[in-house]
Structure formats: structure tokens, C-alpha cells
Amino acid sequence: MSKGRSIKLYLVDGTPGGLITAEIMNWTGHVLCGPRARLPDLLLRNEAKRSGVYLLLGSDEVVPKAYIGESDDLAERFKNHQQLGKSSKADASEKLDDWDRICLISSKDANLTKGHVKYLESRLIALAKQAGRSKLVNVQKAPYKGLPEADEADMEYFVEQVESLLPVLGIDILRAPKAKPTTQSSPAFVMEVKKHGLFAKGQEVDGEFVVLEGSQARLAWEGVPGSYQGLFEELVQQGVLAKDKQLMVFTKNYPFKSPSAAASIVAGRSASGPMSWYLEGSNQTYGQWQSLTELKALADTSNGDGQAQ
């Protein structure tokens, strides 16, 4: 059974759309996030004068883009970004106006060395690539191997905390689908499109609908333009969907925001998730299963079986 943990969020401006700091109890790390428009205020804070890792995040695409970098002075690094971004030859990571959100990851005790932040950057890039939830615009880098064994172990703990904290801030780029079901996972669901001879299997895990590796999908998007077409094409480009004869096959577990998004990618057209997915081994649809699960939870609460607060 997974354990709970306490996370402290502080709205610097008193509004959820402004600067936000985040910490975990008994962890020396510190996260500061804010919209691109608040960059001047963000850079005036003490956290920006530390060494650390930063994330640039974009949200105007089907699959959001991201950049992960490091610096021993985050504020100076962003000044360089601004200067480089004015050049006509600047790449995507250097043009700050192309990003919607900025996140700084540092240590409260200012104890991260250049080696620590290079290792942290390397690990976060690797995790983001593994998760496949974003289009990384980073230049390819080899894993950083310059830390002593003890320091590497400490930084792995640091990475684990970052993985736990970022989704709370709505940043899912490191969040890989779990390889095995958890206590929070639903039963398995299946979807068949007999006309095209395809079969897919999925499961609700941690609030997302995960289509499992080996599931099949249509060879190409056949629905009306728009809708989930962009996501379908992006999954093909990323290699999540790979051609296998006359069908596409999921090369790994892939999480979707809803069962309808998952069903649409499998069917190659817009589809209703609650009506398309069936509880494995039964004629019960996902929608029916969800309704019965909710009714049971309400009944348990009425009978006093709910978890103590």
C-alpha cells in the first residue's frame, strides 16, 4: 500500500495563476513555477540565484513541448536565453516567448554543485523521454556519469521527490505509466473493432486510462479532421504506435486523459470511451462499471464504511 505524504504549496501572489512554490516535508528540494509573463518577478526571487535545473513548458500543441536545462545561476541562464532568443538563428529552446510556463528546481540549503545539477538534468531528460508525454526539444546528451557513488544515491532520492511533486503542479512530463497494476488500478477493459480485426486492452491507473502494450489500433486516422487526429499522428511519430501488417500496435503502455481519447486512437476516429470499452470477460461497458462503482461507494459511505478523515 502506498503511503501518503505532505506537500506544501505557497501561492506567492495569492492567486493560482501566479508564482507558486512547492516543497515536501523533510526534503531539501524546492520548486518554483510561474507563467512566462511573470518571468521578471520569478528571476528577482532568491531561488533564481541558486544552482539548479529548469523546465520550459509549452501547452499549445496536442502533445506539449518541453525543454530541460541546468545552470549554476538560474537567473543568469535566463538572461542568456533572452539575449540568444533575439537572434534569428536562435533555436526553439532559446526563444522564451515560445514557452508558456517556467519551473525552477533547486535546493533550499544551496548545496547542489555543478555536478549535482548536471546529473539531475540528465536524469530528468531520460525520464521525460521514457514517459513520452512531451516533445523534448533538447539536444541529445549522453547520461552524466561524473558523480561519486554516494552523491549519485542522494540525487536519485532527489529525483524521486521531483517525480512526486511535479504532477501536483500539473506538470506530467516525467509521469510514466506504471508497468504493473496498483491498488488504485481498475479491472482490465477490452475493446474490439471486429470489422478491422483489432483488439485493445486498457486499465484505469492513477486517474488515467492506460492502453496496454501490444494493443492494436487502426493503421491510419479515418475520422473527420481535427479531434484526436493530431494525437494519433504524434503517437505514430514518437513510435508509441508502430505498423504491424495492416494495423498499428502500441509499443508500450500509454496513458490517456480519458477512456474516450483512448478509444478514439484505437478506432482511428472519434469514439465514446464509456460505450467502447468493456469489462474483460463480461458484457458490461466501462460506463456501466463506473456507475455501479460510484453507487457502491455511496452505499458504503451511507453505511459508515468510508475511510476516516
Image (tube, rainbow, N blue to C red):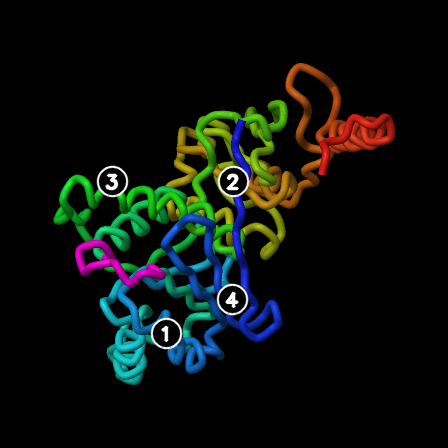
Query: Which element carries disc 4, helix, strand or loop?
Result: strand
Q: Quadrant of residue 292?
A: top right
Q: Give the spatial CA distance, label 1 vs label 3.
A: 27 Å
Left or right of 38, for residue 242? left
Residue range highlighted in magenta: 107-117
Numbered circle sitting on residue 46:
1
- Which residue is the site of mark 3? 153
Residue 258 is left or right of residue 115, and the answer is: right
Q: Position of residue 49 (x, y in %)?
A: 31, 73
Mark 2 Cα within 10 Å, few/some/many (few <14, many 20+)?
many
Kindly report which numbered mark, 4 or 2, lies closer to the viewer in this rendering. 4
Mark earlier in primary sequence (1, 4): 4
Identified by mark 1, the residue type is Asn
Identify the residue under disc 2. 255
For badge 2, the amino acid type reads Pro
Q: Earlier in the sequence, mark 1 or mark 3?
A: 1
Q: Residues within 10 Å of mark 3 (few under 14, many from 20)?
A: few
Q: Quadrant of residue 249?
A: top left
Which of the two discs, 3 and 4, labels the residue nearer the N terminus?
A: 4
